[in-house]
Amino acid sequence: METSTTTLAEYLFTRLHQLGVDSIFGLPGDYNLQLLDYVAPSRLHWIGNCNELNAGYAADGYSRIKGIGALVTTFGVGELSAVNAIAGAYAERAPVVHIVGTPIRPSQESRARIHHTFNDGEYERFDRMQEHITVAQTIINDIRSAPAEIDRVLQQCLLHSRPVRIAVPLDMVALRVPRNGLQTKLSIPLGARQPKVEEKALNAVLGRIYNARKPLILVDGESRSAGILDEVDHLVKATGWPTLTLGFGKGLVDETLPNVYGVFTPQHKEFVDSCDLVLSFGPHYSNTNTYIFQTIPKQDITIAVNATSIHVGSDIFRDLPASTFLPQLIGRLDLDKVSKHTPNLIHPSSVAPPLVSSTDLVTQVGGFWHRMSSFFQEGDIILAETGTAAYGSNLFRLPRNSRLFKAVTWLSIGYMLPATLGASLAQHDLIGRSEYYNLLEARSILFIGDGSFQLTAQELATIIHRKLNVIIFLINNEGYTIERCIHGREARYNDITPWRYLKGPEFFGAPTEGEYAAHTWEVRTWGDLEKALTDERMLKGKGVRMVEVFMERLDAPPPLDSVLNAQIQREKAEQ
Amino acid sequence: METSTTTLAEYLFTRLHQLGVDSIFGLPGDYNLQLLDYVAPSRLHWIGNCNELNAGYAADGYSRIKGIGALVTTFGVGELSAVNAIAGAYAERAPVVHIVGTPIRPSQESRARIHHTFNDGEYERFDRMQEHITVAQTIINDIRSAPAEIDRVLQQCLLHSRPVRIAVPLDMVALRVPRNGLQTKLSIPLGARQPKVEEKALNAVLGRIYNARKPLILVDGESRSAGILDEVDHLVKATGWPTLTLGFGKGLVDETLPNVYGVFTPQHKEFVDSCDLVLSFGPHYSNTNTYIFQTIPKQDITIAVNATSIHVGSDIFRDLPASTFLPQLIGRLDLDKVSKHTPNLIHPSSVAPPLVSSTDLVTQVGGFWHRMSSFFQEGDIILAETGTAAYGSNLFRLPRNSRLFKAVTWLSIGYMLPATLGASLAQHDLIGRSEYYNLLEARSILFIGDGSFQLTAQELATIIHRKLNVIIFLINNEGYTIERCIHGREARYNDITPWRYLKGPEFFGAPTEGEYAAHTWEVRTWGDLEKALTDERMLKGKGVRMVEVFMERLDAPPPLDSVLNAQIQREKAEQ
């Protein structure tokens, strides 16, 4: 019996489709054109981006919603433009597959002096560079091992929720490979159970839980990449324990629950320190995710559940995947033995926004972030770019089945607009599969400063032409306010060039009429804001809606306001 | 006697200023803000870019006009966005200094989990990545050697005309270093003379020259980085020999001379093969610079003058810097012993453009590139982006003291718009120093396709707000025509989103009135083009002028037209 075969390219793209990729990002280049011929036949939608950095950011955004994302670039010039996005995916655990079309093997083997090289016959520099920012790599060069190599690398991507790179020489794209591997879908290997370690860990964890009088749940962003969101949700609801999130974890638990109190800020420190147990899920303790290390719970009262290890105080139980361990724990947990307590915390939903007059100018300190919460709906993906928006987003109250993207650790300004493209497209693809909370439509809402917007502004064109349901609040505060807060508040280098931002949709080719017409609003006062938010075109519009909100240069939410004050004090002391 | 000191930052920036940097590019980031405090005091102009890739491209463009360029980025997120530009500078020998502000040493040494890292305490990944794309690197970490390290790396940048990287931890910026080193300006070390090798080489070269009956001069782009343009100019004029350039060399010799016949295309091959000597200056024989290796002269009749070696046929004389060797050669050369001959070549200036009617649509095959030459003026910098523009630019007749930027080997689309910013600013800075051919004003003229424009479009804002004298011809042919010619001429992946390009200046904040008002023209027919080119606002305008020229999707100059035909033939054969 002859083995049925397919092309290498279709094998690769079919694998991606099986894993949940419906749309794939990238740009054509003359070392990937033949590869791209196989995208559509493999049932993937090609999303041409404006540049490769944006394609990488979009794939990252897509992967955080859909569990995997992919982009295709060309050798050298294309792939190198994407590396900052790939590095960000590594830092924040986004499972991105970076496929690079490379020159034909005869060129590589003869060290031919061709374009997109350094004209010196060396072809491996770009491979070497990207080993530092990917969790696995393969350079396809032997057709016998090609399918296994693809599978190995994709599995590493899933396992670590981190980017991988697959380089495919142009002359191998259409070579035949056996099709039979495709009959088994790839998945994360479970690994064998470690009964001894598991038992010890369960006993240690249950012991701490039953002894605790004042327990707390803390949810952080690596809960997503560890694949334990359902278990976390169960525990939050079943225990009723007070729950906080770190910034990276915000939006990963249902904030409408009465025991979920929002983001752990330094204001909660006294309360958290008074607890005798912190059950910490998916912790990611970088300075920017912890108010500069202020909101890391004390180790001796903490049980930390990481992707593959459980830390109980200073004891570490390794080789226990959280996604296997937590169901065990839930099965064993006797809720009758668990303490309940009502914390002395105010639920965010009961905090009223500051009073404002409709003729007053909109300010962040006067309640902009707080007020926006009433605009949000079930199913929204809300994205808050690095800068004042990311800090402000800590004040959002998120509706059920929503998600929040915000600056975590990589903090590359410019990320969030292309990530909005990716996330919104993932939302769109999930709705198309009827896998989005039974919703038939949903929005993506971006909050971004003018400085950040400028880095990747062109990707708005892709959002427009893909007819995505996206609303943008652009904060015009004349420059890099986050940098002004840190240092050089009056320095010229923190200025940017002034654009007419609301002309953007027109420039980028948005329809001016019809159901996908773009709409724009200029907001200076609270009255302007109210008008924009309640406008029929805002609420019923389907195309891009863009609101330019003017704010003062140094108007910033906590803790940036304190950072700014510290700068001013330093300056005074130096005078 | 106490040694006079300055800060590390001022030492670095003063060195750059001494070497000819008047303007420095980049973006602020919280690991470089304190570094940027010293830019203005060191007499450098800070040019804030829209993103780091664009900053790298701009520094590259600046360096090719001014002999050196520099940019400042921040650790991780900033520097990685720039790597594609740095790699391009390596490939095409542009002397770019990449300065990266890095975290304070206490963070690095304690492996602190801070932003712009992978949250794992590893700080050296980005150093390792960039070793592959820079000719020298230094990580400043000891104040005693800091000035010497800076000097070493800058000297390597000059010597190889290739990028270097200098990483400066934030806590070292304001440390004191001795000022005395600054009294001696850095320069390229001459090296000791090698009399034996030199004598042998001179004899070999002179022997070939005196024996030649049908000699030819071939000028390529590494003549610029080798620092031999004056000597090449002298030899072209003194010998009167027929002279051709490769694409990379176009614009480096005076094309108005009667013996300079433009770009060596396959059409000249028969003539070149009939010569008995080719004196080849600064050759760079990549596929894209040689019509896929068709226009490389035969080795046995070639004398190749490289940066540090002279190749006479198959004999190589090494360790002879061309900038030292050529003056020797010129001193020894007895012009009475040299053959003259008049080639059977048509001088480009005597070729009339095809006849057109003012109501006909503008086409590339109908003479667009040819016709543009009459628009050019002395001192213009003309930039032709990768794609149809780069190939079309082979047909330009360039005026005296002009320069041409075109795709060579790196061919990263998106390069040319930010490079226009850099080149135009270099032109502006040279005029400010009264070092620009006695001209008081000069223009930079960009030809760019719509696909390429989209990658880095935002940098138009910086061009506008710096009030640079820039004219842009944007070719709207609905996508990546160069890719369509190569493969997938009807494929969706070669499409782009349609923008309203002429709204760009307004979106990016251009003045609508006054002397720097932006002006735009839409061109479809030859009559439209004529009107735009002769418009007073075009000729006397000072701000950005932008012309959108509509063309057919598959309208492309040689050799892309043949590439397209080959694709069509392949398709037919496969049917």
Image (tube, coloured by chain):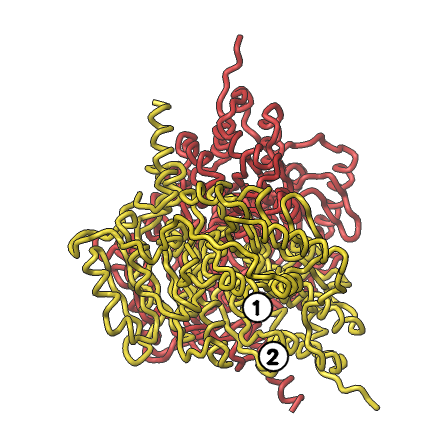
Chain colours: A yellow, B red
Task: Name which residue type carries label 1.
Answer: Gly
Q: To which residue does mark 2 refer?
A: A37
Identify the residue at image location x=34%, y=43%: B440
Say few, some or many: other residues with alpha carbon within 10 Å of mark 1 (under 14 / 14 to 19 / 20 or more): many
Quarter in which the C terminus of chain B is drawn: bottom right
The Cα–Cα distance between marks 1 and 2, rounded to whole angstroms, is 25 Å
Identify the residue at image location x=44%, y=76%: B366
Percent from the top left, x then y, of residue B389? 48, 66
Q: Chain of mark 2?
A: A
Say few, some or many: other residues with alpha carbon within 10 Å of mark 2 (under 14 / 14 to 19 / 20 or more): some
Quadrant of the image occupied by residue A29: bottom right
Percent from the top left, x then y, of residue B429? 40, 41
A193 sits left or right of A90 in the view? right
Q: Nearer the viewer, residue B395 or A116?
A: A116
- For the residues tagged 1 and 2, is the chain the same? yes
Identify the residue at image location x=36%, y=69%: A377
Q: To which residue does mark 1 refer?
A: A67
Count the numbered circles shown: 2
Question: In this picture, is A76 found above or below B238?
Answer: below
Badge 1 or badge 2: first in the primary sequence: 2
Task: Name which residue type carries label 2.
Answer: Asp
Identify the residue at image location x=44%, y=45%: B27
Q: Nearer the viewer, residue A504 or B286?
A: A504
